[in-house]
Amino acid sequence: MKVNVTEEPAWKRVLAIEVEPEIVDREKEAVIEAFRKKLNLPGFRKGKVPKDLARKYLGRDLEGEVLQRVIPKVLQEAFLEKDLRPIGDPAIGDLEFEEGRPLSFTATVEIAPQIEITGYKGLAVTREVAEVEDETVTPRWTLFASSAPPSRKPTGPLGSGTSSMWPTSS
């Protein structure tokens, strides 16, 4: 697999990828084999259809299925190889896919920006401590206490599923 990376703006990369025909053929055979196992044609037992007949039955859908399997795998390898962290799905373009030739395409992807933070070491930070006075707290506390429902001492034994916060010793 060949990967060339072109840097557009600082946050965008264009990857030109070329995949060897052997990898594509291996994936194509895997697709045909998986399809053969599910294919049920008259005159053949399920899963026993010849490869050539399965390939003919798949037709143009075979190419689409192979591309759906190969492109994500190749992109993951390319991202790891080039140490890229994409922020979304890549846009695929310039796709060239012919029998016996390398698969080639471009993938345009936005990446996480490289941010270097400097100048923060040695900064002095002062912590402000808020002073709370009784004149500020007392009216709020009185309002809070008066809005709470009145508390009642339990009159009988507590049943199952109930609880009490009253002290039990007298």
Image (tube, rainbow, N blue to C red):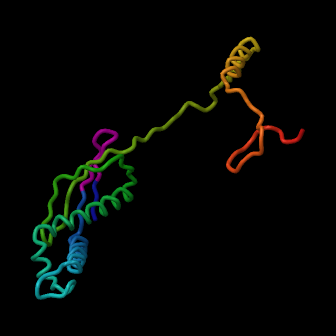
Residue at position x 26%, y 61% in the image: 71
Foreground: 113 or 169?
169
Classify residue 49 as left or right of residue 8: left
Side of 111 relative to 60 (left or right): right
Dominant SS in magenta:
strand
Question: In the figure, 168 relative to 129: above or below?
Answer: below
Q: Is residue 64 left or right of residue 144?
A: left
Highlighted range, magenta: 5-16
Q: Quadrant of the N terminus?
A: bottom left
Picture quadrant of residue 32: bottom left
Tag count? 0
Residue depicted at x 38% and y 51%: 84
Write the residue at 51% across / 35% down.
Answer: 117
Residue situated in front as seen by the camera: 144 or 17: 144
Please say whether residue 7 is one of the residues in the magenta stretch: yes
Q: In the displayed structure, would residue 147 be above or below residue 2?
A: above
Residue placed at 68% from the left, 21% from the top? 144
For the C terminus, the quadrant is top right
Asked where in the image residue 76 lies, by quadrant, the reply is bottom left
Q: Nearer the viewer, residue 113 or 146?
A: 146
For this orientation, the residue located farthest to the right is 170
> In x, y percent, where is residue 12?
30, 43
**Residue 95 at what x, y percent from top left?**
16, 57
Q: Considering only vertical position in the picture, is 84 above or below 8?
A: below
**Spot occupied by residue 93 in the image (x, y as percentages of width and height):** 18, 52
Within the magenta stretch, is there residue 144? no
